[in-house]
Image: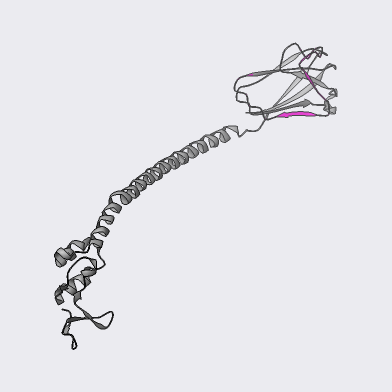
Amino acid sequence: MAQTRSNPINGNLEIWHDILEAWVSAVADLPSVGGKPVQLSSSDFAMMEAIANHAANLSIIQSILGNNFYPEIQQINSKLGDISTFKLQAIEGNIALLQTSIDYLSTQATAVAAGISSQTLILQSMRDTAIATSPAITNLTLVNANTQYAYTFQAGTKRYAFKCRADAAKNDPIADVRYSWFTGMVATGINSYDVLPASSEELSQDYFEDDKVIYFSSAIAGTVLTIREWQ
């Protein structure tokens, strides 16, 4: 219960204000805002002091002051209602949209992560498939000069190489080799063919899904071609 006293000079009721550490009048001077003087009891003052900073309790202040309720407070209450109706609803709507966006982005991020994981597995599988084993070596003898000889790379071949063997101990001739992926080009050297110099090697990382035929020829009979392929 608040401490009260009568002012020693004018006899008006006063209440001790703990924060101000002073006696303050318990009479609300309302005529300046269209009301009438109101004598507050100590319990009324304590109640008003307790609810002064709580907008939700304006109705209690109104019940205390009766017909002298401040028009300004009524306007404030109306403005608070407008703020609640329009501003807060708009904010809530924006928050809902933001939450929807966050949920969408979260879904997209999950989908992207799943896609990356799936692609990683695919790439890993491709890498595992692409790892070549030890090469198989085939010696293809071009018995006759300027004659086409065919060689077939099997499906699944991941890498290949070929060159003139030129093994002196075997009396291999050292010769250039004509080659083409098209038949009828290498025997006489026309149109789509290429020449592999005797001192060179052709190496490729090609991957063959189906059997692939390559054609060879040399101007020197008995040229031995060494073909290496990785499966």
The prevailing secondary structure element of the residues shown in magenta is: loop
Q: Relative to 81, does residue 156 appear above or below in the rendering?
A: above
Percent position of residue 139, x then y = 74, 23
Q: Position of residue 81 (x, y in %)?
A: 26, 54
Vertical placement of residue 137 versus 143, above or below:
below
Pick the front one: 67 or 59: 67
Measuring from the top left, give residue 134's x and y in whole percent. 65, 33
Q: Magenta stretch containing residue 189, yes or no?
A: yes
Pick the front one: 14 or 34: 34
Residue drawn at the location 65% of the way across and 19% of the way down? 212
Range of residues picked out in magenta: 185-211
Left-right relation of 154 to 93 = right
> Residue shown at 18%/74% (left/top)?
45
Residue 78 in the magenta stretch? The answer is no
Q: Nearer the viewer, residue 5 or 33?
A: 33
Count up the numbered dots: 0
Position of residue 226 in the picture relative to residue 26 (left or right): right
Towards the viewer: 152 or 6: 6
Q: Is 110 rendered above or below residue 147?
A: below
Q: Quadrant of residue 182?
A: top right
Q: Is residue 164 left or right of residue 105?
A: right
Up-down: is 16 above or below 152?
A: below
